Amino acid sequence: MKQPMVSIIVPVYNVEPYLGRCLDSIRCQTFRDFEVLMVDDGSTDAGAALCRAYAQGDRRFRLLEQRNAGVSAARNLAMDHARGTYLQFVDADDWLAPDATAVFLRLAQTTGCDLAVSWFYRVDGERCAARGHIRGGQVLTRQEYAEHMVKAPANFYYGVLWNKFYRRAIVEAHHLRCPADVSWCEDFLFNLDYIACSRLVATVQEPLYYYRKRSASIVNTQATLRRTIETKRMTFNEYKELYRQLDLYEKRKPQIYRYLLSSATDGGVGPLSRPLEPEDGEREGAGRA
């Protein structure tokens, strides 16, 4: 079987009401040479059956199944099976802009970057607002990217996987995987490890992803004070180590330590806020925040 250019990874756990829109947004991407690795993480709803229907109807879609072990384990299983040159991550209750994969791929190929990062839309009820941090399109060294990140490290823009595009060769060469022993911040820990192994980062201000803000998310339901403190301490050690590796620790020490007081945010610098129309998911192909 021909190797796909992109492997799109979708962990699935009890999100049946949202899953169809997510998978449709992937199926209808303007760029077509991809595989979709859907990982059912022991769902108790009909999500797995829906994934099977997509796999039966489109050979690019594959369903992997595991006992409930969490989103990190699901992503890791998919990475073990991925064959694409690039990796792209989508949460099953979110969706992609129609040209998201095409824009990311073009950015990666024209700049030679190891990591591509986009703005996104946050969807909260009927409202849709653009979110991000680095303005304009830029090609940055990892040190330059870290200089931006230190200003807002808890911003989703830097922390999450779903507004980014990764080279699988780097992930495999350095045996990078999501830490399965933490229930949140696992995305940021993966990104810290990946940045340390990267050379160039390319950014685009165009929102390419729609992030659905839900009160039932893991962050909102499991972030106890004790767990927050423990995770923050562990994440800070990794964060601090990255800046040491990049020879930026002494220069940015006061800003680096502010991370301990920061709290996760989906940003607030986006200029666009508008009602989300019923069929906007197809045009949305612009992102989400």
Image (cartoon, rainbow, N blue to C red):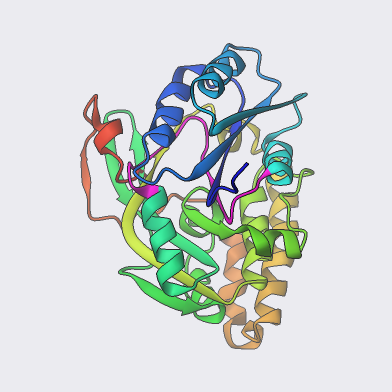
Residue 113 in view here: yes
- Does residue 105 appear left or right of residue 45 in this picture? left
Percent x, y of residue 7 = 57, 46
Counting the numbered discs, the total is 0
Quadrant location, the C terminus: top left
Task: Return the residue found at the far front.
Answer: 1
> Looking at the picture, does residue 265 appear above or below residue 195?
above
Percent x, y of residue 9 = 58, 40
- Residue 194 lies in the magenta stretch: no
Residue name at image x 53 percent, y 52 percent: 5
Percent x, y of residue 273 = 22, 45
Residue name at image x 78 percent, y 24 percent: 67
- Does residue 74 appear left or right of residue 216 in this picture? right
Residue 118 in view here: no
Percent x, y of residue 72 = 70, 41
Q: Which residues are magenta?
A: 82-100
Quadrant location, the N terminus: top right
> Looking at the picture, does residue 6 appear above or below residue 246?
above
> Looking at the picture, does residue 2 appear above or below residue 201?
above
- Residue 96 lies in the magenta stretch: yes
Residue name at image x 37 percent, y 74 percent: 138
Query: In terms of secondary structure, what is the magenta stretch mainly?
Result: loop
Q: Nearer the viewer, residue 29 or 47?
A: 29
Residue name at image x 59 percent, y 88 percent: 251
- Please identify the quarter of the rendering in which residue 132 is found: bottom left
- Please identify the quarter of the rendering in which residue 219 is found: top right
